[in-house]
Amino acid sequence: MSGFFTVLSHTADTGIAIEADTFAEVLEWASRGMFELMYDLGDSAAERSVVVEVAASTAEDLVVDVLSELLYVSEAHDVIPCRFAIAAVDATSARVTIGVTPMRTELLHGPPIKAVTYHDLLVEESDDGTWRARVVFDV
Amino acid sequence: MELERTSDVIWEIPASEGMRVPGRVYASDRLLVKAKEDQAVRQVANVAHLPGIVDASMAMPDIHWGYGFPIGGVAATDVGAGGVVSPGGVGFDICCGVRLLASNYSLDDFIDHRNDLMAELDARIPRGLGKGAIASRALVGAVLQSGAKAVLDAGFGWEGDLDRCEERGTSPGAVPKLISQKALDRGGGQLGSLGAGNHFLEVQLVDRVDDEEAARVFGLSQGMVVVMIHCGSRGLGHQTCTDQLREMGAAMARHGIGVPDRQLACVPVESAEGERYLGAMAAAANFAWANRHVLAHEARRAFAAAFGTSPDKTGMNLVFDVAHNLAKVERHRVAGRERELCVHRKGATRAFGAGHPALPADLRPVGQPVLIPGSMGTASWVLAGTDDNPAFGSAAHGAGRLMSRKAAKRREPGHEVRRELEASGISVRPGSVKLLSEEAPYAYKDVDEVVDVCHRAGLATKVARLVPLGVVKG
């Protein structure tokens, strides 16, 4: 997978910026980035897989909705997503397979994220066909 | 963005570029410097675009960069004139707030029982990750409808507690069926838990009293050990806001509303979507009132166990419980006329003055207790609301962050922050030592200066200063 994410500086909250070759990779890096802000994923082994399917009306909304769904899965099921694969994606729908490990306090290294915001949200394809995105989280 | 000074602690952003009213920031020169460095002042101007907003888009002295609204933001919209409600003006942690308990104990008592007390609190107060909770999930249905009253009826807390809660601990108009199954899955098992981040339970000492009469009425005195609890509606509230924001974004187009930041999504209060949001918000708020109520109950039990007595002998009466993330329909005078307004307080504390009919009879002579927590190494404050408050009965809600989390984390590791706090006599029981670095005292502004600006601007007046003795963090 190509691309990367960087951590944005924000006074009260936190966020990530992503650069990637494809929209699918944007989704994958955004998912990974959100959980790496909270947890030291390191070499955590996934104990099982969960499939998340999301549809939205725009690419921006799709990013927010996928990340929000992963937060829900994590907190509702007491698991930490540690492996991410975008099984299928187009501009308005995505199927994401995550590998999860049981929630453990010792993996926590950042404050738990409460929600994915629309503030300063950016998802765009550049003229050269690569993608960049920016997402701010409430912590 | 240019600001015009209108008094020693008030700064105006002239209305321009789609702003319906000016912006108004309450700050000293020093407090304003940081707000101007990032997007906080721009966010005050953005909020001024909301349909129906009256007077000004305001920011309290603890203003800092948030998402959509600035933290410390106050905005009131005229309900009868198409005024909107915006979930961004409440935030994801619906009804996050602060509760303060008095006690019969002194500093010497605390020192004599420090280890036992901190061990009891450490063991009893669920925090951090996971679903550890004091109260049963089975209570959640009743809690969503009637808040703190539901847990009081289930045996948590004391009869007089509700008299000392904003809204008596129950937000009116709650519609529990609007709380999604996802919100219940996420937070239903968290009733009676702190969470993490900047949430805490602190044992504090009243180290100074500025207003003896108000302190007496509140039930505080110099040298008293008190307990402050800061937390909100946990995953249930976070998911409720997420659900509602998604619906509201789509509804805005139907109402022909545009805003400069998507997190400011809004709809008229008097619309089907507005009523849905307020109904869901009130139900999530009821979870938060009940959450703090249950935690306070457990704190009383922890003190009783540590001091070898029963909870009713601890003197841990409720001083007050007040929210700082809420939108409420209230009546205020604007331009000489009383109007029904939807007052958004995003990181701002309700601060009603003496004589306000919403206050219980015993508080009416002096005004509402306004609780302003600082950082875990400095101080917190109790103020009293003023009857001529210029910000729709609102004041600051905390010290306000000075450093980003990233910068604070770089400065010192969590174990070093803990060592320094312990060396200064503050016992720390963290859910995660690593997370302490982001909440270090140096990451926050000077709470004394924030409170001083509140006092000078007439937002609220100083009553008592509290210093930390023991900190239980998420």
Image: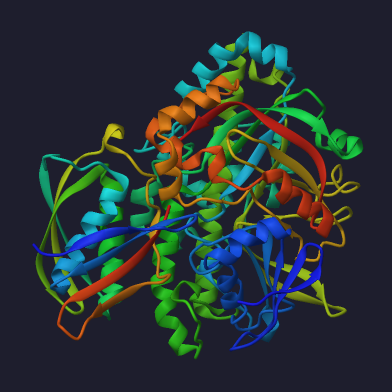
In percent of width and height, residue A96 lies at: 14, 62
Q: Specify whether A90 is left or right of B365.
A: left
In percent of width and height, residue B416 lies at: 44, 28
What is the basis of the colouring in this image?
Answer: rainbow
- Compare residues B111 and B26 and report the one nearer the observer: B26
In percent of width and height, residue A110 lies at: 36, 44
| Quadrant of the drawing holding the N terminus of chain A | bottom left
Number of labels in the image equals 0
Q: Residue furthest bottom?
A: B256
Q: Tell me what residue is drawn at x 30 percent, y 54 percent.
A: A71
Q: Specify whether B35 is left or right of B134.
A: right
Residue B94 shows in the view: yes
Q: Tell me what residue is drawn at x 69 percent, y 20 percent.
A: B312
- Compare residues B333 and B357 and report the one nearer the observer: B333
Q: Tell me what residue is drawn at x 38 percent, y 34 percent.
A: B434
**Residue A93, picture quadrant:** bottom left
Above or below, comparing residue B447 to residue B11 in the picture: above
**Residue B98, picture quadrant:** top right
Above or below, comparing residue B432 to residue B4 in the picture: above
Q: Specify whether B419 is left or right of B380.
A: left
In percent of width and height, residue B196 lies at: 44, 41
**Residue B108, picture quadrant:** top right
Residue B179 shows in the view: no
Above or below, comparing residue A122 to residue B203 in the picture: below
Q: Tell me what residue is drawn at x 32 percent, y 68 percent.
A: A134
